[in-house]
Image: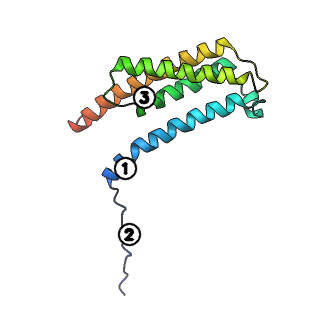
Amino acid sequence: MIIQREQHQIPVFNMEKIRKLLPVLRAMIFISIALTILILSLVPKPPELIREFALSDKIMHLAAYIALAFSLGFILPKSFKVKAIVLFTIISSSLFGGLIEFLQGFTGRSPELLDLLFDAAGAAIGIYLYFTFKKIMIKYIGNAHKGKN
């Protein structure tokens, strides 16, 4: 009796197609984070889950803008100088936070200058983490190509 084995095809990924899709994926992640911040900041009454969350409002601002700035680092052109990326990220994130604080006045929520300061601090931390991550990845990938892990 001969038993035949079914041959399974292993999917082959086209790395070129994946590389082309990465900028789109990165932009979608950034936009998702920005929209989440916008919606959660402008709802008149935050969802129960957020109100019950043990972290303070300021820590939530800090965390949200760390994520926003970190993801923004991935979509800015590589031709920009580090200083330009840092300034653009902190200024644009602060303007976004300022706009949200202004709009909160129309939703029954109270705008706070301290929220804006935590937004800017989060943006600064986020872009710092982006450059730290990038440096680590370059070192790791560089070592992997040399056969050193």
Q: Which type of secondary structure does the marked residue at label 2 adopt?
A: loop
- In the picture, measured across the screen, residue 107 lies left or right of residue 140, that is right
Q: In the image as oriented, which residue stretches furthest toward the left?
A: 146
- Label 1 sits on residue: 18
The residue beneath circle 2 is 8
Identify the residue at image location x=68%, y=32%.
40
Residue at left offset 60%, top offset 15%: 118
Amino acid identity at mark 1: Ile
Q: Residues within 10 Å of mark 1 (few under 14, many from 20)?
A: few
| Quadrant of the frame with the N terminus | bottom left
Give the mark, 2 or 1, whose residue is nearer the N terminus.
Answer: 2
Which residue is painted at 58% across and 19% down in the image? 119
Q: Quadrant of residue 130?
A: top left
Image location of residue 46, percent across then percent down:
75, 30
Residue 17 pos. (x, y %): 34, 52
What number is the disc on residue 73?
Answer: 3
Task: Name the N-terminal-most of marks 1 and 3.
Answer: 1
Q: Are marks 2 and 3 in contact (CB under 8 Å)?
A: no
Name the one closer to the observer, 73 or 105. Answer: 105
Query: Closer to the camera: disc 2 or disc 1?
Result: 1
Is residue 27 among the parts visible in the rendering? Answer: yes
Query: Disc 1 versus disc 3: distance between alpha carbons?
Result: 19 Å
Q: Position of residue 94 (x, y in %)?
A: 55, 19
Neighbours of disc 3 within 10 Å: few (<14), some (14-19), many (20+): many
